[in-house]
Image (cartoon, rainbow, N blue to C red):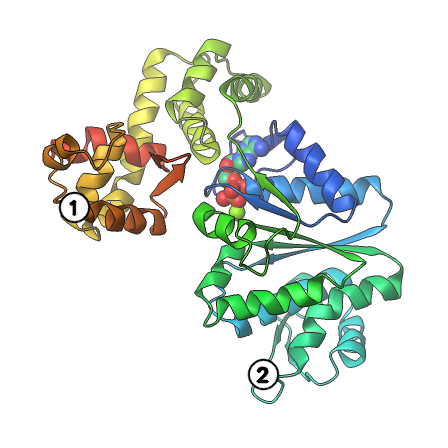
C-alpha cells in the first residue's frame, strides 16, 4: 500500500494541503507580473507552494506561460549560478536538442558552451557545461535570455529561484545583486519569484533601502499551516488508506511538532506505519520517540560542532528564557558577560538554528528543541 505521507521531497497533488490564501496571493502576483519574494524557515513549504502555484497557472492559462525553476542550493559563485540558470531556462524552453542549439546561437552567441547529454535524447537529462574564461560578456545575454525567449514566442515567462540567499556567499554579493536587478527591472515579459530560508539575510536584502533589491516586489513571509488544517489532512490521509485517527489525535500530532510541515509529515508517517486499524495514544507516543531517535545522530554532530557557550545559549532559548542578557540568565546558563550575548545571537542565527521574530528568539527545529531539553541536558 502506498504510504500517504511524504517528506524530504516537495508535497504534490493530494499530498499537499492548505495554504489557500498563499496560493491565491502568489498566483495573482506571478500571473500578473508582480515579482515576489518568499521567506520562511527551511522545510515549512516554500518549494511545494511555488511548484503548486506554477502548475495551476500553467494549467489554467492554456500555454500562455513558460516557467522555470533554478535551485541555487550548491551554487557557490557567479559562474555556478549562470550555469544553473542557463540550464534551467533552456530545459524549460526547448523540447529538442536542435532548439537548444538554435537558442544559444541566436541569443548567447559569444558563449559556445559544451553540450553534454546525460541520457541520449532525454531532454530532462541534458546539461550544459559553460566555460567562462573567454566568455565574460555572455553573462548579460544569459540574464536577458528569458525576456528574449518570451518575446520571441509571444508568451510570459515566470522564473523562480530557490535558496536565493546563497547569493550572499558570492565574492561581491552587492555588486552581483545590482547587476541582476539592473537587468531584471527592464524585463517586461518575465516575472521573478525569489525565495529562500534565511530570514535575516533575505529580509535585509529586500527590506533595506541601501540594498539593490530594496522594494523589488511583494514580500511574502510564509506562516505555518495551522493545526486544525493539519488535523483534517492527517485524518483524511489515514481514512483514504483504510486506517483511522480521531481529529483530536491528529491535531495533537501536528501540535507536538509545532506544525512544522516536514515533521508533521514524518511523524504522521511513523504513526501510520505503526497502526493496523486505529491510532492509539501508545502509537502517538512511540512514534514520537522514534522521530527523535532518528534525528539524534544529526543533533549529536551538530552540537559537537558548537562551543559550550553556544549550546548553553540554545538551552536558555529552548527553556523559553526571555531576557537573555539579564544577570540571572547569564549566571544560570553560564553565558559569561552580557557583552557575549550579541556574538552568541549572531552565531546561532547564522547557523540557522535560531530565528529572531519581533525581538523574540526561537529554536527553529522543534525536534532539536525537544532533544536539547530532554535528551542532551540529561546526558
Ligand atoms: N502544503 C503542504 N502540505 C503538506 N505537506 C507539506 C506542505 N508544504 C510542505 N510540506 C511538507 O514539508 C516538507 C518540506 O517542504 P518544502 O516545500 O520542501 O519546504 P521548503 O522549501 O520551505 O524547505 C515536504 O517534504 C512535505 O513533507
Ligand atoms: Mg525548498
Foreground pick, 85 / 288: 85
Q: Can residue 302 be spotted in the picture?
A: no
In the image, is the residue at mark 2 within 8 Å of ligand 2 by its beta carbon?
no
How far from the left and from the top, in percent, is residue 375? 19, 32
Which quarter of the image is occupied by the N terminus?
top right
Judged left or right of residue 346, residue 228 is right
Disc 2 to disc 1, C-alpha distance: 46 Å
The quadrant in which residue 322 appears is top left
Local packing at callout 2 (Cα closer than 10 Å; few below 14, some 14-19, many 20+) is some
Vertical relation: 148 (above or below) 373: below
**228 w.r.t. 350: above or below:** above
Q: Label 1 belongs to which residue?
A: 309
Percent from the top left, x then y, of residue 141?
71, 75
Residue drawn at x 73%, y 78% as measured from the top left:
108
| Image coordinates for residue 72, horizontal then vertical, percent | 53, 60
Total numbered circles: 2
Q: Is residue 54 visible to the viewer in this orientation of the structure?
A: yes
Indicate left or right for 293 with 134 as reference. Answer: left
| Label 1 element class | helix
Residue bearing mark 2: 131
Give the mark toward the camera: 2 or 1.
Answer: 1
Q: Residue at x 61, y 27 (%)?
A: 18
Residue at 71%, 45% (x, y): give it: 54
How dense is the environment of label 1, judged by Cα within 10 Å: few (below 14), some, or many (20 and up)?
Answer: some
Judge by depth and name the residue closer to the eye, 320 or 5: 320
The location of residue 303, given as percent across then percent down, is: 22, 46
Which SS class for mark 2?
loop
Q: Is residue 43 left or right of residue 128?
A: left
Q: Quadrant of residue 10?
A: top right
Amino acid at each position: 500500500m502506498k504510504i500517504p505521507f511524504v517528506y524530504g521531497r516537495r508535497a504534490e497533488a493530494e499530498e499537499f494541503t492548505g495554504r489557500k490564501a498563499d496560493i491565491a496571493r502568489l498566483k495573482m502576483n506571478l500571473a500578473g507580473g508582480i515579482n515576489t519574494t518568499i521567506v520562511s524557515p527551511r522545510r515549512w513549504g516554500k518549494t511545494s507552494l511555488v511548484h503548486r502555484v506554477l502548475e495551476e497557472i500553467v494549467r489554467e492559462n492554456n500555454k500562455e506561460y513558460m516557467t522555470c525553476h533554478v535551485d541555487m542550493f550548491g551554487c557557490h559563485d557567479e559562474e555556478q549560478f549562470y550555469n544553473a540558470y542557463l540550464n534551467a531556462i533552456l530545459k524549460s524552453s526547448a523540447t529538442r536538442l536542435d532548439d537548444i542549439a538554435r537558442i544559444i546561437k541566436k541569443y548567447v552567441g559569444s558563449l559556445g558552451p559544451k553540450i553534454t547529454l546525460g541520457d541520449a535524447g532525454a531532454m530532462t537529462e541534458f546539461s550544459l557545461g559553460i566555460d567562462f574564461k573567454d566568455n565574460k560578456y555572455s553573462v548579460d545575454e544569459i540574464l536577458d535570455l528569458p525576456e528574449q525567449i518570451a518575446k520571441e514566442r509571444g508568451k510570459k515567462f515566470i522564473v523562480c529561484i530557490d535558496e536565493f540567499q546563497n547569493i550572499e556567499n558570492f565574492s561581491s554579493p552587492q555588486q552581483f545583486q545590482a547587476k541582476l536587478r539592473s537587468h531584471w527591472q527592464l524585463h517586461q515579459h518575465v516575472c521573478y519569484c525569489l525565495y529562500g530560508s534565511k530570514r535575516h539575510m533575505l529580509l535585509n536584502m529586500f527590506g533595506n533601502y541601501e540594498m539593490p533589491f530594496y522594494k523589488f516586489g511583494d514580500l511574502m513571509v510564509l506562516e505555518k499551516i495551522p493545526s486544525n488544517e493539519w488535523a483534517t489532512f492527517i485524518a483524511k490521509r489515514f481514512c483514504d488508506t483504510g486506517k483511522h485517527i480521531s481529529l483530536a489525535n491528529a491535531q495533537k500530532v501536528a501540535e507536538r511538532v509545532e506544525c512544522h510541515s516536514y515533521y508533521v509529515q514524518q511523524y504522521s508517517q511513523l504513526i501510520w506505519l505503526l497502526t493496523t486499524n486505529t491510532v492509539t495514544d501508545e502509537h502517538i507516543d512511540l512514534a514520537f520517540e522514534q522521530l527523535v531517535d532518528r534525528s539524534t545522530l544529526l543533533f549529536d554532530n551538530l552540537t559537537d560542532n558548537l562551543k559550550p557557550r553556544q549550546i548553553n545559549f540554545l538551552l536558555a532559548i529552548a527553556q523559553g528564557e526571555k531576557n537573555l542578557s539579564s544577570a540571572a540568565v547569564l549566571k544560570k546558563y553560564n553565558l559569561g558577560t552580557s557583552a557575549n550575548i550579541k556574538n552568541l545571537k549572531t552565531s546561532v542565527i547564522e547557523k540557522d538554528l535560531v530565528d529572531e521574530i519581533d525581538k523574540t528568539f526561537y529554536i527553529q527545529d522543534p525536534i532539536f528543541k525537544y532533544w536539547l531539553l530532554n535528551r542532551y541536558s540529561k546526558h
